[in-house]
């Protein structure tokens, strides 16, 4: 069970982040809000997110049978990394728009 749980969790996190990468590439000059969908949603990214989330939960449940802390590690690893990536993307978009405004003045 440990092997299957670990593989399911890793594949789930990878799929979730592939979908996030697709969304970031579809919105290069638009901020991605944390509480809403992005302005442009690429086809297939929602399915990848759903499949990734399901595999993350499956991995957390399977790994939870051996130690109580594994579900927390699995469930927090993906979203924390996604929050960091979205924050960096939004900062880059803000810096670009600030640079354009400085040039325009």
Image (tube, grey):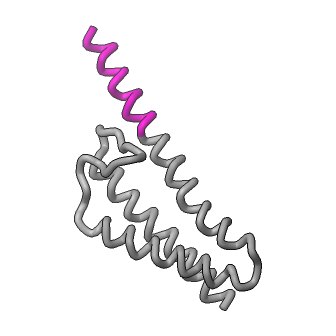
Whether the magenta-drawn stretch holds residue 94 is answered as: yes
Q: Is residue 70 left or right of residue 80?
A: right
Q: Is residue 45 left or right of residue 7?
A: left
Q: Residue most toward the top?
A: 105
Question: Which residue occupies the foreground of this view, 44 or 59?
Answer: 59
Q: Is residue 8 left or right of residue 102?
A: right
Q: Quadrant of the C terminus?
A: top left
Give the residue displayed 30% in from the left and 49% down from the top.
38
> Residue at horizontal 36%, vertical 21%?
99
Residue appearing at x 61%, y 61% in the figure: 77
Residue 5 horizontal/vertical position (percent): 61, 84
From this view, report whether residue 56 is shown above or below residue 7. above
Horizontal and vertical percent for residue 57? 53, 75
Segment tinted magenta in the rendering: 90-105
23 relative to 75, above or below: above
Outermost right residue:
67
Query: From the viewer's perspective, is residue 39 above or below residue 5?
Result: above
**Would you say residue 96 sits in the magenta stretch?**
yes
- Quadrant in the picture for the N terminus: bottom right
């Amino acid at each position: 069970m440990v092997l299957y749980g670990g593989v399911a969790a890793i594949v789930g996190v990878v799929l979730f982040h592939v979908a996030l990468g697709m969304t970031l590439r579809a919105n290069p000059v638009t901020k991605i809000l944390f509480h809403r969908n992005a302005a442009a949603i690429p086809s297939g990214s929602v399915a990848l997110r759903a499949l990734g989330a399901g595999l993350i939960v499956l991995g957390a449940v399977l790994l939870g049978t051996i130690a109580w802390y594994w579900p927390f590690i699995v469930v927090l690893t993906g979203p924390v990394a996604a929050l960091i990536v979205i924050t960096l993307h939004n900062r880059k978009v803000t810096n670009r728009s600030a640079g354009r405004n400085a040039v325009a003045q």
